[in-house]
Image (cartoon, coloured by chain):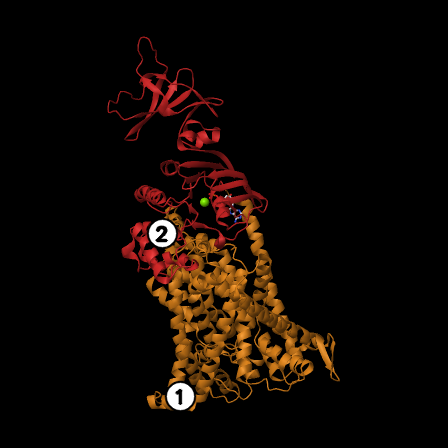
Chain colours: A red, B orange
């Protein structure tokens, strides 16, 4: 494997921030580390970048053991959440900075940096000061600066969290595009399920310092390994222990002669493209159901409905 | 009382406080300041003409040159060296950082003349190192002595200020450089030093101003090398020529003011910096020529600082008899008559100055910064002025301003207390400004929303939420009052001496060992106050920790 992390453990004093973390990443793959805030995502990234020593475990990158290398000697580049742009340098100087430590001539370095700025569509800002750029532009400078040194592994810590909602969606695509163009192995951290689903090849789900599940978005959504995953990813109705059904997988209809009503709608939340219903079942349970908005508005509060679905089991 | 009446009353009180503070600042800072100008520039019947001014400057040419030489050299040296030490601190392991912080905190408390005393003790004609160890005969007196001792004396404060700048730096900037492949040398040179440059300018200008105004060091180890500050002082004490003294102080004030303008410019820039994560602990590797260089510099200077303080203590506890030194408590015994009531008086003055000064400045800054009252900003600015006024300048101003009725205060204890209180507003208002900018403005609005008045903003928001800031301002006021001399030396009557004056007299009359004992007492008192502050802080954190809701 290109990157393999084996049994990594990290303690802050007597607080165990990472417990026995093991996973692998293929070359050119985009891995999302997803989990609630405080679960140890940034810590994991900092261990991979070399900023935090680990207590046990190993990191292999490209068949080389990098566990004990300091950050400046690891072929890994990190883009931090606050970007870490050098405020006393221009955009171009920022992007050129890492090239200084590779054996490149000055002209070559400038050429490379400009080409990278071109790629992130910031060439015309090359000689501007950092604080003249918008948040999204700063983000791209930081990205360009890390990409230009062609690291074996790129780490991004919540890269989109400082941007507004619209920009976030377009930057998702931009990052994905650049990552695929350059075929650069990337790990990015996020607490946003949608972000992880829309960008990642593989998702590593974390909770309280543990890896809970690894897999594609479909794997994780359709086959959650435990209750935490079910709770954290999407919405669901827990029917019994280990038994659940997702709200959008329930078909809802008006009762007919053959199919008697099973419950009554007690709340309708109109969300535009979808509509959410809370249903009080006659057997005493409650279910939530989601349908696409088909503009028929058949179902109102008080409407009696019949439901059909297949139960799924956790870990199955 | 019905609500409306209460509201009106509070508004009146609010206005009253504002006017009172403004009045006090104008009377006890601006008025004495103007009086120095008036006395300096106005003879009995006419204003000093331009040609008279030119003559005066020419006549004092060599003093001006000497002063600027010393101040410039000292500030370059003290700044460069403290940059070196702060970089070393930045790279040092945790345990060493803790130790160094403590050392700088302790050595920052320096009663006047301490470094000069140590210098004479170690390097003087009969000095411990120069004479007893190395058998040298050299002349320790002169510009080189002043520069060395001032540099050493300002090192701790400068280093602490620079460490403050370093700690406020965005951690991810440094880590990004690391991740891009920069080694320790490059990170220091390419990233940290450029980002520190504002801090460096600030530290250099503060050093320049302090050095220019210092009359203690040159008066003891200047020898025949005279500077403006010593002359300004001697004109009052020895020659009774206070107009000449006022003029000389004006000469000191002008370059200090120019440098101060630079300083405020940089300070302003500093407050609207872009933010990021403040630095935590770095994993920079301790290697590279630059690290080795700052390590050597730091070890030497830290050694010198420790030696300086040890020598004072040693000096206090030894006597020389027939050419031999031996441990003894004789000095302590002998110092008793000099202490009598002076220490109690000093502590009381320092307590009053600390308490009044800190509350006054927080209230003042509340009006200028939180309430955004325009004219209060001017009052705020005036309160900062003692920062650039040499101590003797401020003291002279009080003599000129308060020697005639109805404001005849000269000769009372009150004038001394007022002087030390208003002198430290400069620092305390800055502290307050930083502290109050941390308070979420919505808290003030909530106070009103819930039926409170402006007075409640002060009482229920400002003071409770700036406890730490108030403590720091208090401690600083206390310590600086315990160690000040320049501003009060002309104001104190022999019967009401404070500790620093006793110290000064002893140094003047060559009783260095007794002076060392007094210096030790002063340091001990200040250290106790600082120690209590840390205990209180710790205790407060504990209490807060127990009641906080997560
Ligand atoms: N330097 C540190 N010292 C002690 N505890 C830390 C440190 N950094 C992070 N932690 C703790 O480790 C846990 C994981 O933090 P982090 O990796 O930042 O979480 P995430 O990025 O997933 O939000 C948190 O509980 C945090 O309080
Ligand atoms: Mg994080």
Q: Do labels 2 and 1 share a chain?
A: no
Q: Callout 1: helix, strand or loop?
A: helix
User: Are the two marked residues, 2 and 1, in contact with CB atoms closer than 8 angstroms?
Assistant: no
Vertical placement of residue B438 versus B24, above or below: above
Mark 1 Cα shell of 10 Å, populated few (<14), some (14-19), many (≥20): some
Query: Which residue does the image show at 59% across and 87% down from the upper left?
Result: B139
Count of residue discs: 2
Find residue B220 and report its horizontal and vertical position in percent: 57, 83
Q: Does residue A180 appear anywhere in the picture?
A: yes
Find residue B446 and report its horizontal and vertical position in percent: 39, 47
Vertical placement of residue B121 versus A87, above or below: below
Which of the pair A286/B435 is nearer the observer? A286
Vertical placement of residue B129 versus A46, above or below: below
Per the model, the C-alpha gap separating discs 2 and 1 is: 59 Å
Vertical placement of residue B66 versus A224, above or below: below
The disc label shown at residue A144, or none: 2
Q: Callout 2: helix, strand or loop?
A: helix
B359 to the left or right of B441: right
Q: Mark 2 lies on which chain?
A: A
Which of the pair B468/A215 is nearer the observer? A215
Kindly give the residue lying farthest to the left in the view shown: A295
Mark 2 Cα shell of 10 Å, populated few (<14), some (14-19), many (≥20): many
Taking the image in four quarters, ligand 2 sits in the one at: top left
Residue B344 location, quadrant: bottom right
According to the picture, the residue beneath numbered tag 1 turns out to be: B57
């Amino acid at each position: 494997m290109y990157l393999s992390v084996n049994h990594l453990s990290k303690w802050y004093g007597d607080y165990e921030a990472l417990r026995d973390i093991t996973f692998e990443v293929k070359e050119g793959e985009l891995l999302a580390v997803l989990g609630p805030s405080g679960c140890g995502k940034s810590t994991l990234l900092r261990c991979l970048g070399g900023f935090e020593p680990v207590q046990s475990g190993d990191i292999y990158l490209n068949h080389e053991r990098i566990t004990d290398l300091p950050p400046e000697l690891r072929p890994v580049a990190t883009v931090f959440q606050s970007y870490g742009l050098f405020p006393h340098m221009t955009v171009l100087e920022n992007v050129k900075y890492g090239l200084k430590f590779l054996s490149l001539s000055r002209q070559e370095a400038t050429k490379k940096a400009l080409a990278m700025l071109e790629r992130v569509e910031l060439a015309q800002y090359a000689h501007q000061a950092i604080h003249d750029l918008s948040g999204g532009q700063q983000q791209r400078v930081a990205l360009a600066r890390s990409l230009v040194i062609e690291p074996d592994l790129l780490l991004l810590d919540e890269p989109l969290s400082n941007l507004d909602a619209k920009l976030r969606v377009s930057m998702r695509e931009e990052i994905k595009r650049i990552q695929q163009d350059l075929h650069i192995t990337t790990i990015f951290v996020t607490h946003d399920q949608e972000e992880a689903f829309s960008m990642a090849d593989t998702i590593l789900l974390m909770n309280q310092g543990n890896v809970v599940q690894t897999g594609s978005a479909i794997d994780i959504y359709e086959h959650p390994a435990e209750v935490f995953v079910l709770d954290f990813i999407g919405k669901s109705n827990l029917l019994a222990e280990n038994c659940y059904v997702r709200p959008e997988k329930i078909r809802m209809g008006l009762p007919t002669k053959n199919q008697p009503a099973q419950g009554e709608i007690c709340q309708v939340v109109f969300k535009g493209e979808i509509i959410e219903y809370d249903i009080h079942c006659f057997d005493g349970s409650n279910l939530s159901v989601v349908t696409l908005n088909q503009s028929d508005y058949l179902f109102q509060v008080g409407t009696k409905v019949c439901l059909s679905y297949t139960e799924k089991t956790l870990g199955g | 009382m019905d609500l409306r009446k209460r509201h009106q009353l509070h508004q009146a009180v609010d206005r009253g406080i504002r006017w009172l503070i403004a009045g006090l600042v104008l009377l006890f800072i601006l008025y004495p300041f103007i009086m120095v100008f008036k006395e300096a520039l106005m003879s009995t019947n006419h204003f000093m003409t331009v040609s008279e001014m030119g003559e005066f400057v020419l006549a004092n040419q060599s003093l001006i040159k000497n002063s600027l030489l010393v101040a410039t050299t000292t500030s370059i040296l003290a700044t460069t060296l403290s940059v070196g030490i702060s970089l070393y601190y930045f790279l040092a392991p945790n345990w060493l950082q803790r130790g160094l912080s403590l050392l700088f905190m302790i050595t920052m408390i320096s009663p006047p003349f301490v470094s000069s005393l140590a210098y004479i003790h170690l390097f003087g004609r009969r000095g411990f190192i120069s004479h007893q160890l190395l058998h040298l005969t050299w002349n320790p007196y002169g510009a080189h002595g002043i520069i060395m001792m001032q540099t050493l004396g300002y090192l701790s404060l400068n280093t602490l200020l620079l460490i403050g700048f370093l700690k406020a730096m965005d951690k991810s900037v440094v880590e990004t450089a690391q991740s891009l492949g920069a080694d320790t040398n490059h990170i220091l040179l390419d990233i940290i030093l450029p980002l520190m440059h504002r801090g460096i300018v600030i530290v250099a200008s503060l050093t320049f101003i302090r050095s220019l105004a210092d009359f203690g060091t040159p008066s003891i180890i200047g020898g025949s090398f005279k500077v403006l500050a010593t002359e300004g002082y001697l004109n009052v004490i020895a020659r009774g020529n206070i107009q000449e003294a006022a003029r000389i102080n004006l000469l000191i004030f002008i370059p200090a003011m120019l440098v101060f303008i630079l300083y405020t410019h940089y300070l302003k820039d500093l407050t609207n910096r872009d933010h990021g994560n403040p630095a935590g602990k770095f994993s920079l590797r301790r290697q590279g020529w630059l690290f080795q260089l700052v390590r050597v510099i730091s070890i030497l200077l830290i050694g010198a600082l420790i030696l300086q303080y040890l020598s004072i203590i040693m000096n206090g506890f030894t006597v020389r008899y027939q050419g031999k030194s031996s441990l003894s408590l004789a000095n302590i015994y002998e110092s008793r008559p000099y202490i009598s009531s002076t220490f109690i008086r000093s502590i009381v003055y320092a307590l009053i100055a600390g308490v009044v000064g800190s509350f006054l400045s927080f209230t003042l800054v509340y009006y200028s910064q939180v309430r955004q009252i325009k004219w209060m900003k001017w009052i705020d600015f005036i309160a900062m002025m003692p920062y650039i006024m040499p101590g003797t300048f401020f003291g002279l101003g009080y003599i000129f301003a308060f020697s005639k009725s109805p404001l005849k205060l000269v000769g009372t204890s009150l004038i001394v207390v007022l002087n030390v209180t208003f002198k430290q507003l400069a620092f305390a208002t800055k502290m307050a400004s930083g502290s109050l900018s941390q308070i979420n403005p919505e808290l003030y609005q909530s106070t009103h929303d819930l039926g409170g008045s402006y007075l409640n903003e002060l009482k229920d928001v400002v003071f409770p939420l700036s406890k730490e800031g108030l403590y720091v301002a208090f401690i600083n006021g206390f310590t600086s009052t315990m160690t000040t001399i320049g501003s009060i030396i002309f104001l104190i009557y022999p019967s009401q001496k404070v500790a620093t004056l006793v110290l000064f007299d002893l140094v003047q009359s060559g009783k260095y060992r007794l002076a060392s004992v007094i210096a030790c007492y002063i340091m001990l008192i200040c250290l106790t106050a600082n120690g209590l502050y840390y205990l209180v802080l710790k205790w407060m954190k504990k209490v807060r920790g127990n009641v906080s809701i997560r």
